[in-house]
């Protein structure tokens, strides 16, 4: 109601301004006509006239009424240069701040809620450097000040910052206009006040803050680099440390634009994803899923039988899959693309020099204009008492350990209720292991909505996983050949006997052994970078898991583009990393896929949303495939079809999500998805039906009522 009241007051004031033809007094001719009267009033009551002029100027600026330039001239004509500048300077800044506050109060919340995801980068920039850019705009009078007032109100810039920057930045223009006003009788047009030469001077003046920023940046870089001697020339344009997803893509892009690039990898090309993570786990999940289908053949009209297989052959298939994919990331392929690949351990010596200890022995030093750190992450191992005595596996080591087993471990404990823990628990229980999954929190997949976690829990329990949420691992114990994990729940301890224990409680960035400490490159949980992926040194970048904030292969590749381009061409143009649309999938059965916000995150961030849900049990193809568990849930801006986020649970959810990722990336709404033809019968139709559900919920009921009457009339 307060917003409506303010809008009504503004409309009433604006209407009165035009209705009573007050605009005639804010013209050059109008001011000249009453100049003598104003000067007479000033002589009789200088304080009262000055205060009245001050209030009128504030009101005109706050309401964004035309005539601010003429009012400024009047200030010079009536009060002279000194007092005119003082009064106008403060009145214009106060009025501008009032307009700023009105725009913020009435419009900012709705604009930010509707375009918040797209404005995220702008908001961060304004919070960090808003004063600088506002000052630049204020110095150049060709930018309409009233428009600046309103637009800045929609951003997160602090009110006090807006006021004092406006006070300072508008001073030069105020001085010019007030000084011109002292010669009001000789002025025939306000356009003549700002000559081309004066405009050019203002424009040059407006560049000073930006040039100052560049100078400050140059001085900071000089201070950072001053202890190091920069080489006169360089061996390479780019040197990449790490041959995982981020490193490979970075090197590929550099070679594609004909830069001389060296890639250094200490272990296996392809990194964790190829050798220990994405590829082997998905191969294992496929075998486990097939075993599950055989075990439940009666769901498809077939005989349900217990699958017969040798676990050793399942693991051999995993290795064959890795070997088949391996050439895509091989030394031979990247050498053929123009990348020099070196096997060894790389360590930064200075901002341009990398020392490489070869796997075959010997040390080589290379200099490079730019360096990208893409060293990835490793599994986190909790400091549980007795863990080393009983032995443990991680998502990195289990493939080699299990490769020689004829059978899956009889009793398996999986620590962790995140995506990796859930995928491994379900896969191994389907392959015959008795699995206990231990999660400290109250539910698994804690980043997802509660109903998603509940559906995932139900699926794991149905497959036979002993799911222990709310259980804290205390210690490991050994009694001869028997091994136990001791867990605690609500004050009670329980011992879980196991043959194998997998730690799947997260991953940590590889930060040590690369010389980061010597160079003073800051690290927290990851390498600290700015929005361009630069570290402390503008020529050293980080990308992938070692840089965060996401630990996905596809985000590592996404960051790699920015790292490569900024490293090679950043002196001319830099690109901020765009994290606005990041998808991910947990490959349990049914899959859980998400992009953008879910309900949980939207509530935490205070973002208004509507939920549209379509259940797969109504989808023809899902019914035919006996894959009806799951749903498509879309979050949209209230009353609009603009997508804020999507969660899909179901068969091939990760594949189905791609349509929504594309829509969000390019600003397409649910109406566009609804109007797109989807092949029948496919699972992808679920996306269209979700859009149709939204359309039905937003049908124009009043119009439909009139159409019903129209059709009734046509029948009669």
Image (cartoon, helix red, strand yellow):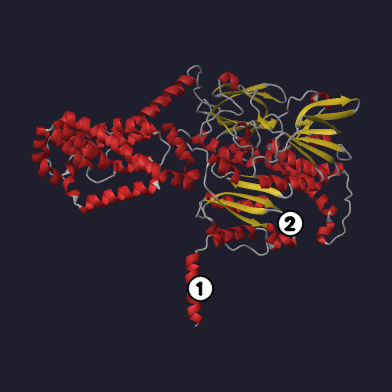
- Residue visible at 82% across and 50% down in the picture: 292
Left or right placement of residue 271 versus residue 354 in this view: right
- Residue visible at 64% across and 54% down in the picture: 632
Q: Residue 582 has which mark?
A: none
* The furthest residue to the bottom: 716
* The furthest residue to the right: 480
Task: Residue 165: give x, y in percent of width and height.
Answer: 33, 31
- Quarter of the view holding residue 510: top right
Instruction: Tell me if residue 539 comes above or below residue 254 in the rendering.
Output: above
Q: Element under label 1? A: helix
Estimate the spatial distance between the alpha carbons at disc 1 and disc 2, rounded to whole Å.
Answer: 39 Å
- Residue visible at 59% across and 32% down in the picture: 547
Of residues 696 and 69, the one nearer the viewer is: 696
- Quarter of the view holding residue 141: top left
Q: Element under label 2? A: loop
Residue to which mark 1 is pinned: 708
Residue to which mark 2 is pinned: 627
Task: Residue 653: give x, y in percent of width and height.
Answer: 67, 51
Left or right placement of residue 507 versus residue 533 in this view: right
Q: Residues within 10 Å of mark 2 (few under 14, many from 20)?
A: some
| Residue 260 in sight here | yes
* Count of marks overlaid on the render: 2
Left or right placement of residue 412 versus residue 607 in this view: right
Of residues 59 and 417, the one nearer the viewer is: 59
Q: Which tag is nearer the camera, tag 1 or tag 2?
A: 1
Instruction: Tell me if residue 510 comes above or below residue 120 in the rendering.
Output: above
- Residue visible at 42% across and 22% down in the picture: 219
| Residue 132 in sight here | no
Task: Residue 561: give x, y in percent of width and height.
Answer: 55, 39
């Amino acid at each position: 109601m307060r917003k409506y009241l303010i809008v009504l007051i503004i409309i009433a004031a604006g209407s009165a301004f035009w209705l009573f033809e007050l605009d005639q007094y804010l013209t050059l001719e109008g001011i000249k006509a009453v100049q003598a009267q104003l000067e007479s009033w000033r002589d009789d009551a200088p304080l009262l006239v000055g205060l009245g002029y001050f209030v009128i100027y504030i009101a005109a600026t706050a309401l964004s009424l035309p005539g601010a330039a003429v009012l400024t001239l009047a200030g010079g004509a009536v009060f002279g240069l000194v007092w005119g500048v003082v009064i106008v300077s403060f009145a214009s800044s106060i009025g501008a701040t009032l307009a700023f506050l009105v725009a913020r109060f009435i419009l900012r919340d709705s604009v930010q809620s509707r375009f918040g995801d797209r404005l995220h980068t702008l908001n961060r920039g304004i919070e960090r450097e808003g004063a600088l850019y506002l000052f630049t705009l204020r110095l150049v009078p060709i930018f309409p000040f009233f428009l600046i007032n309103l637009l800045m109100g929609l951003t997160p810039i602090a009110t006090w910052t807006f006021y004092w920057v406006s006070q300072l930045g508008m001073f030069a223009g105020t001085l010019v206009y007030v000084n011109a006003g002292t010669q009001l009788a000789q002025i025939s047009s306000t356009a003549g006040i700002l000559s081309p030469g004066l405009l050019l001077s203002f424009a040059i003046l407006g560049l000073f803050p930006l040039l100052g920023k560049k100078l400050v940046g140059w001085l900071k870089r000089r201070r950072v680099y001053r202890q190091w001697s920069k080489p006169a020339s360089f061996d390479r344009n780019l040197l990449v440390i790490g041959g995982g997803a981020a490193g490979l893509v970075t090197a590929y892009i550099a070679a594609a634009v004909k830069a001389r690039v060296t890639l250094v990898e200490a272990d296996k090309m392809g990194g964790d994803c190829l050798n220990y993570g994405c590829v082997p786990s998905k191969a294992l999940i496929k075998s486990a899923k097939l075993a599950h289908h055989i075990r439940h053949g009666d769901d498809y009209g077939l005989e349900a039988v217990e699958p017969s297989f040798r676990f050793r052959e399942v693991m051999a298939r995993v290795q064959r899959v890795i070997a088949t994919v391996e050439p895509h990331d091989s030394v031979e392929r990247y050498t053929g693309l123009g990348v020099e690949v070196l096997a060894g351990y790389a360590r930064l010596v200075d901002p341009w020099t990398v020392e490489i200890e070869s796997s075959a022995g010997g040390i080589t030093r290379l200099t490079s204009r730019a360096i990208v750190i893409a060293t990835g992450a490793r599994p986190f191992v909790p400091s549980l008492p007795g863990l080393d005595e009983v032995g443990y596996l991680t998502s990195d080591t289990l493939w080699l350990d299990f490769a020689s087993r004829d059978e899956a471990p009889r009793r398996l404990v999986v620590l962790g209720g995140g995506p990796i823990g859930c995928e491994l628990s379900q896969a191994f229980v389907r392959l015959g292991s008795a699995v206990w999954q231990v999660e400290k929190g109250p539910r698994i997949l804690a980043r997802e909505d509660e109903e998603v976690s509940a559906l995932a829990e139900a699926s794991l329990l149905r497959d036979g996983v002993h799911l222990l949420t709310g259980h804290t691992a205390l210690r490991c114990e050994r009694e001869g050949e028997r091994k136990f994990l001791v867990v605690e729940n609500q004050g009670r301890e329980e011992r879980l006997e196991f043959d194998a224990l997998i730690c799947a409680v997260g991953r940590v960035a590889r930060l040590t052994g690369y010389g980061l400490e010597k160079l003073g490159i800051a690290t927290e949980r990851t390498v600290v970078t700015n929005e361009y992926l630069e570290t402390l040194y503008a020529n050293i970048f980080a990308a992938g898991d070692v840089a965060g904030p996401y630990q996905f292969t596809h985000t590592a590749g996404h960051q790699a583009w920015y790292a490569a381009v900024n490293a090679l061409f950043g002196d001319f143009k830099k690109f901020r990393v765009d994290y606005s649309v990041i998808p991910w999938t947990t490959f349990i059965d049914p899959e859980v896929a998400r992009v953008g916000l879910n309900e949980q995150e939207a509530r935490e961030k205070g973002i208004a949303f509507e939920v549209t849900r379509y259940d797969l049990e109504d989808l023809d193809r899902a019914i035919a495939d006996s894959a009806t568990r799951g749903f498509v849930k879309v979050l949209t801006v209230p009353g609009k079809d603009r997508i804020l986020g999507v969660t899909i649970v179901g068969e091939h959810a990760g594949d189905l999500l791609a349509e929504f990722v594309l829509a969000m990336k390019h600003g397409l709404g649910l109406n566009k998805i609804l109007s797109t033809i989807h092949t029948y019968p496919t699972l992808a139709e679920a996306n269209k039906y979700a859009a149709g559900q939204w359309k039905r919920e937003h049908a124009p009921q009043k119009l439909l009522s009139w159409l019903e009457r129209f059709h009734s009339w046509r029948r009669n």
